[in-house]
Amino acid sequence: KNSEAHPHCTQPGPTAMGIDLKAGGRKTKGFQRKEPKTDNIYVRLLVKLYRFLARRTGSKVNKTILHRLFQSKTNRPPLSLSKLGKFMEGKADKVAVVVGTITDDVRLLEVPKLRVCALRFTHTARARIVNAGGECMTFDQLALQSPKGENTVLLRGPKSHREAVKHFGAPGIPNSHAKPYVRAKGRKFEKGRGKRNSRGFKV
């Protein structure tokens, strides 16, 4: 009788090693930062402060500020003085809070009196706010003045105004307003001549 094992019979062999997956599997969708990626000690200290305030006061404003301190630079777009003035009309007694940068706008001729708290101010924006009798605050000063976020207006800059966003999409096709990456706007570079429906162009 042949003592060789049948090819279809299962013999105990070396066990296959797997990887440990936490409950929920490999899902990464809906991931939210729990801390900032930056090593900036001032941002880290603000996170410590607002983590404490969010926990102890239960204020939604403090929770939102904490969440925005975690965000990437793309998600913390700058806000111009002109937009800031527009948002703060009729709210002279409140403090504008921007987790981002306040930038100058040369088109704005007169800056209203504003009280603003932001992560950063450009040199000219800070000078114009102070010269108009306003106040530029840091987040630790805001925490002392209104620990629960009372009398504040949380604002954000526009995310869609980055140069990169203008290039999103396919340029050159009908009804597309995507900006092409062209070296120059001269005669010798892509002009998209004839690339429209009226010239029989089809995608």
Image (cartoon, rainbow, N blue to C red):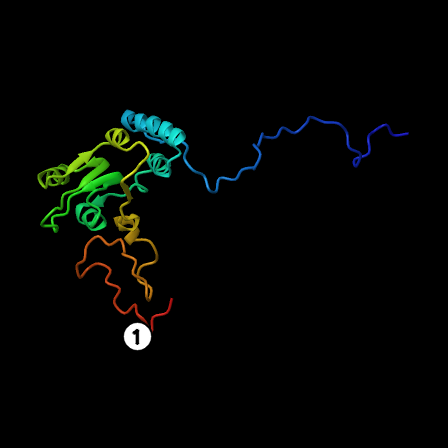
Amino acid type of the residue that numbered disc 1 sits on in the rendered structure: Ser
Residue under the point 41% across and 32% down: 34
Quadrant hosting residue 75: top left
Q: How many marks?
A: 1
- Viewport quadrant of the C terminus: bottom left
Q: Is residue 20 above or below residue 187?
A: above
Q: Is residue 56 above or below residue 168?
A: above
Q: Report the residue marked by disc 1.
A: 198
Q: Residue 175 at x, y = what percent?
A: 32, 66
Q: In the picture provided, is 8 more to the left or to the right than 130?
A: right
Q: Residues within 10 Å of mark 1 (few under 14, many from 20)?
A: few
Q: Residue 139 at x, y = what percent?
A: 26, 32
- Viewport quadrant of the N terminus: top right
Quadrant hosting residue 43: top left
Residue under the point 57% across and 32% down: 21
Q: Residue 116 at x, y = what percent?
A: 20, 39
| Nearest to the observer: residue 187 or residue 146 | 146
| Nearest to the observer: residue 141 or residue 31 | 141
Secondary structure category for the residue under label 1: helix
Taking the view exactly as shown, the residue that stands out farthest to the right is 1
Q: Residue 151 at x, y = what percent?
A: 27, 40
Q: In the picture provided, is 53 more to the left or to the right than 113?
A: right
Residue under the point 23% across and 45% down: 79
Quadrant hosting residue 52: top left
| Nearest to the observer: residue 122 or residue 202 | 122
